[in-house]
Structures are given as C-alpha cells and as structure tokens.
C-alpha cells in the first residue's frame, strides 16, 4: 500500500490530477463536503493523507508517506531529509522581499542594517540576508505578513508572491526575488531504495503526465530532475 | 489611538463583544464579507488588527498593538514579553495528552521512554514531559495532529481539546491534562506603564463586562488577575 501526503489548499486540485494520471484516484478530497483526512484510492493500491502544506515533508521524512506533493518554498524552509523527485510545474510563485511602495527602497541591499523583516519563512530570509551580508532582525509571523510594514512593525517582508495583487492592495511592492517556487513530488529516501517497482511506476507516470502538461502549456519548465537543493 | 490585536477564528466573536462593552465597536470584523485586516472603531479612538492566533502576542510584544486577545495556550507556547491583564473566561479548552483508545495507556507516565509525540505545541509538550522526567521525541506538526497516532507516526499527541469530539471521531482518548486554557486580555508592558488613563479605562470596562458575563454564566472562573505565567 502506497501512502501519499497531499497539501490542503492551492496545490490540491493539480496534485490530485497528476496522481489520476498514475491511476490513483483521490478526487474525493476535492469534494467540499469531505471531512476525511485519510482516503483510499478506489483501486486499493494507495491512500492519501490530507495535511497542511508544512506537514507534507514531515510525514514523508518519517516514512509515514512514501510520496508527497509540496511547494519548493516549504522544502527550502524546513530542510527535512526527503528526496526531491519531479518538478510538477504548477503552483508557480516566487519568494520575494517586499517593502512599502512609498519607502524608496529599490533593492534588498538598500534596506538599513538591523532593520526588522517579518516573514513566515524566517529560515529562507535568514539565509538570504546572511548571503547579502546584511544583518536584519527577523520577526516570525504565521499569516498576513503584509501587516508588518503597514503597522510599522517591520521595514520589509519576505513572502510568497503569485500575482502580486495582495502586495498592491496593501501598498507594497516586491523589490527582489529570493527564488522561484513550484510544486514538487518528493519521496521517502529509504522507501525509494527498497522499492520493488510500484513506487517507481507511480513516479514515472507522474513525470510523463507532467511533461505532457508542460508541453501543452508551451512552457519550458523542466519536468524531471530539478532537485530541491 | 489604541491598537488592539484580535485573533481570527473561534475567539473573535466574544472578543468583539468584550470590546463593545468598552465602547469600541469592531463588529465589522464579524461580517463574513470583510477582507480588511485593520479596521477603525466608529468612535475614532481605536483600531483593530485581525491576525492569526499565534501572531497576537507578537504584535503586542513589539508594541504595534497596546492590547490583544489570545488563548492562554498560545501565551504559554510562545513566551513573549507581554503583560497578562484579564482572564476573559471564554474559549475554554484544555491542553491534553491523547493516545489511541486501543493503546491501553491510561496516564502520560505509561508512555514508553523515547516514544514519539506529535504536537502543534511542542514547547508546552517539552516542558510537560521534562517535568515528568520522561524523554520523548517531539514531532512538530502545524495541523491535524490526530493523524500522528492514526498513521503510526507517533504514539501520542499533545493538543487542545474542547468537546473531545475530534478525538473520539479519530479513535483517540485524552489521558492527562497539561493545563486549562481560556482567552486572555494582554497588554504591551511599556504602553501600560506610560498610559495616562485611556488604556486603563478600556481594561477596566472589559474586566467589568467579564465579571458580569461570568456571573450570568454562574461560573466561578476568576475574572481578573489570573496571570499567564
């Protein structure tokens, strides 16, 4: 029995579609009335765990799920021992430094030393500012990070930006990107090593489905082998 | 201008009611169509920030909000420098150790040494098991903690229990309480010290409203002075 950890929220619909291409049907998770956190696929070969984004790599790292789908941003933030397998291409966004539009800062290095930066991704932010050699005070928030500059608690934020609408609505502007993020298929390293075929079959089907989805979209996103390192 | 940090979710309705007793009307936050994160009270004396539970003590600790309402559980977990002011009595629940009903464990000390315990409140759990002199491996999850024992990832969980329905629905049972939690009014220590009267006036009105609400409920919950320490 293969167990798959899927993230609630924005990535779920596309994740379910990719597993459908591998013959595993978890579409019951898309039913708004569904309250189950663990659902079997009708074929009986697999089951899915529906968990929070940040918990996907935890279940995979502990081997409770052999496969999982999670954003590259979460992988970088939590640095758990999981194997990156396929760049799924969907869920595209970027991690960016943003400031008040009225602030006059045009790049991250313009920020004053020891200023405050609010983020849900304080480890990613810490690495970025340390590579920039700019000491900042990081404030960890769990949501609505854009309130940091609005209330005056922080000079800048580091957050995920998809369309940029939330930033604009709050009078903020992205001034520098840390990295681009897409959804990734990840695996439990030991389960992959001990696999007699069934896991690799699922991974190959998802990689093939991703390649054809990427071709249809006419985009140049690499489908396989873009390691989360 | 007084700024108040209020938590989204279960505590919001009662929080808004208590501030109404102090003449500050933030009822627009209860409108399901509201998308604003910062709303002024019609009287012009105050504004409310609508933030995640765990972020309330952050805004108060940094002085971006002079007052806030948050669960005692969050205060204990994050240990930020804020002043506990009034035990508001609502939002009652308890932090408990829970295990599979079928496990046979009847108290926390029955758990095997070095077993895994999943929790959103790993710092509270760490203190509890260290006082118990029982070494455990803590796994930090951000949601659906009950999946820990169900999937076999952890032997036990430490989580908030209100009615106990979620536990029962998942075949789990609470075997020991860490502490009881209710919503607390907290303040920024320096703002309280520099206050010329208006802050204390709000605090006194909320304490009085809490006392009469507690009397109406016929309960013996202490209204003032139950410090979050």
Image (spheres, coloured by chain):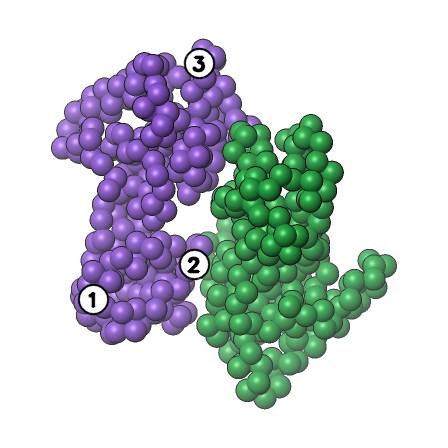
Chain colours: A purple, B green
Label located before the other in sequence (1 or 2): 1
Q: Which residue is mark 3?
A: A45
Q: CA distance from mark 2 to mark 3?
A: 40 Å
Name the chain letter of the residue that bears numbered label 2.
Answer: A
Label located before the other in sequence (3 or 1): 3
Up-down relation of residue A62 to residue A139 (above or below): above
Q: Residue at x 64, y 56 (%)?
A: B131
Give the number of the mark in front: 2 or 3: 3
Front position in the image: A96 or A124:
A124
Q: List x then y, in percent, for residue A138.
A: 36, 65
Name the chain letter of the residue that bears numbered label 1.
Answer: A
Q: Which residue is mark 1?
A: A133
Up-down relation of residue A98 to residue A137 (above or below): above
Alpha-carbon neighbours of circle 3 within 10 Å: few (<14), some, or many (≥20)?
few
Mark 3 on the same chain as mark 1: yes
Give the position of the C terminus of chain B as an image quadrant.
bottom right
Q: Residue at x 60, y 82 (%)?
A: B198
């Amino acid at each position: 029995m293969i167990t798959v950890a899927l993230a609630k929220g924005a990535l779920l619909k596309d994740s379910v579609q990719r597993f459908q291409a591998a013959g595993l049907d978890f579409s019951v998770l898309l039913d708004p009335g569904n309250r189950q956190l663990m659902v079997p696929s009708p074929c009986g070969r697999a089951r899915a765990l529906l968990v929070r984004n940040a918990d996907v790599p935890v279940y995979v790292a502990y081997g409770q799920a052999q496969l999982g789908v999670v954003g590259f941003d979460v992988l970088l933030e939590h640095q758990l021992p999981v194997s990156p397998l396929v760049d799924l291409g969907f869920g595209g966004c970027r991690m960016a430094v943003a400031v008040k539009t009225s602030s006059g800062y045009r790049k991250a290095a313009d920020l004053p030393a020891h200023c405050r930066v609010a983020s849900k991704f304080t480890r990613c932010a810490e690495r970025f500012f340390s590579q920039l050699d700019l000491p900042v005070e990081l404030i960890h928030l769990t949501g609505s990070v854009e309130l940091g500059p609005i209330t005056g608690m922080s000079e800048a934020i580091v957050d995920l930006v998809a369309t940029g609408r939330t930033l604009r609505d709050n009078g903020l502007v992205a001034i520098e990107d840390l990295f681009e993020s897409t959804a990734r298929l990840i695996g439990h390293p030991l389960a992959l090593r001990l696999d007699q075929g069934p896991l690799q079959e699922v991974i190959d089907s998802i990689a093939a489905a991703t390649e054809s989805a990427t071709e249809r979209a006419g985009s140049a996103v690499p489908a396989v082998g873009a390691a989360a390192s």
